[in-house]
Image (cartoon, rainbow, N blue to C red):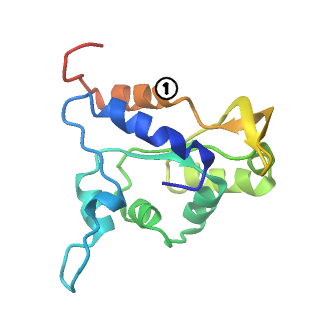
């Protein structure tokens, strides 16, 4: 989970994906166990072994920067670093419009797309919360709608709903 306000959509994405066959969703909080010892499985390595697809939703400016620079200070960034290059990885951008338009963001996206070959999905325009006084303004920076994220995964992985509905 990143620090983006769009994190509120994560439970919606997960709950809809769990309606499909052969879908397993885990985050670091689900698999970290107290009392780990030397020789125990290493979380980010274990997660990479079973992950058929990885979503970073939302991908904040901080997460994008950390990954582009190889900074592995969080479990999910360590997972990204450990992934096989063939693992489909999608980063759904979500950040303040000014952060998205910053020149460093373009450079980070270049690295993400051309060096590590992740799919960086551009943010969409909509009303965004801004600052500590929650007021809204129309801008580019919102994460892709959660239902559209699920559609991307369903199509990429050719998932079938448990109830056989489409």
Picture quarter containing residue 75?
Answer: bottom left
In the picture provided, is 56 more to the left or to the right than 109?
A: left
Indicate whether 132 appears above or below 28: above
Left or right for 92, reference 135: left
Residue 63: percent from left, percent from top? 58, 58
Residue 118 x %, y %: 49, 48
Q: Residue furthest bottom?
A: 38
SS type, badge 1: helix
Q: How many marks?
A: 1
Could you tell me which quadrant the C terminus lies in?
A: top left
Q: Is residue 17 left or right of residue 162?
A: right
Give the vertical position of 41 relative to 76 (above or below). Answer: below
In this view, 41 is above or below 77: below
The residue carrying pointer 1 sits among few (fewer than 14), some (14 to 19) or many (20 or more) residues within 10 Å by Cα, namely: few
Relative to 159, say whether 42 is above or below.
below
Q: Percent from the top left, x then y, of residue 47?
A: 28, 59
Residue of label 1? 148
Across and down, in percent, residue 140 comes to 74, 35
Report the residue that reaches farthest toward the front. 133
Residue at image coords 34%, 44%: 53
Q: Residue at x 75, y 57 (%)?
A: 104
Q: Residue at x 19, y 18 (%)?
A: 163
């Amino acid at each position: 989970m990143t620090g983006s306000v769009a994190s509120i959509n994560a439970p919606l994405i997960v709950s809809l994906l769990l309606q499909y066959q052969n879908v397993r969703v885990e985050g670091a909080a689900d698999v970290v166990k107290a009392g780990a010892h030397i020789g125990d499985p290493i979380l980010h390595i274990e997660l990479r072994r079973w992950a058929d697809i990885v979503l970073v939703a939302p991908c904040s400016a901080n997460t994008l920067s950390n990954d582009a620079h190889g900074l592995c200070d969080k479990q999910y960034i360590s997972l990204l670093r450990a992934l096989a290059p063939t693992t489909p990885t999608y980063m759904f951008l979500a950040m303040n419009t000014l952060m998205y338009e910053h020149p460093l963001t373009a450079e980070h996206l270049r690295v993400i797309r051309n060096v590590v070959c992740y799919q960086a999905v551009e943010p969409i325009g909509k009303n965004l919360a801004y600052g500590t006084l929650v007021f809204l303004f129309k801008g580019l920076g919102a994460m892709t709608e959660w239902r559209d994220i699920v559609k991307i995964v369903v199509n990429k992985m050719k998932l079938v709903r448990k109830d056989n509905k489409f």
